Image (spheres, rainbow, N blue to C red):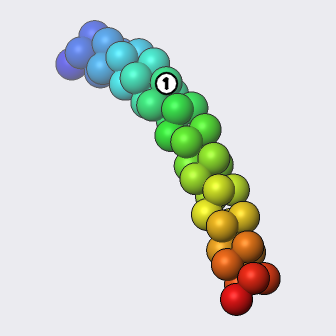
Amino acid sequence: MDEHKEIERTEKKTDSSRVAVAFIKYAAILIIFFGILWFVINYIL
């Protein structure tokens, strides 16, 4: 049970951290993009 838990933890850690980094990167880009887009639309209209 401990061995399985340890293996699962290490695999989950690497996968989740990799996915989290990519997700945070894309989320930040999308938030900035939509923020600028919203600002431009409200400013022009």
Determine the residue located farthest toward the front in the rendered image: 44
Q: Residue furthest right?
A: 43
- Judging by the rendered image, the residue that carries numbered circle 1 is 18
Residue 22 at x, y percent in the picture: 52, 32
Give the secondary structure at mark 1.
helix
Pinpoint residue 2: horizontal percent, then vertical percent. 29, 16
- Figure check: 10 above or below 26: above
Residue at (73%, 73%) from the top-left corner?
40
Query: Does residue 9 appear in the picture of this structure?
Result: no
Task: Give, as a three-letter code, the residue at label 1.
Answer: Arg
Q: Is residue 45 shown left or right of residue 24? A: right
Residue 31: x and y in percent read 62, 58
In the rendered structure, the answer to whether residue 43 lies left or right of residue 14 reads: right
| Quarter of the rendering containing residue 19 | top left
Q: The C terminus lies in which quarter of the figure?
A: bottom right
Residue 10 visible here:
yes
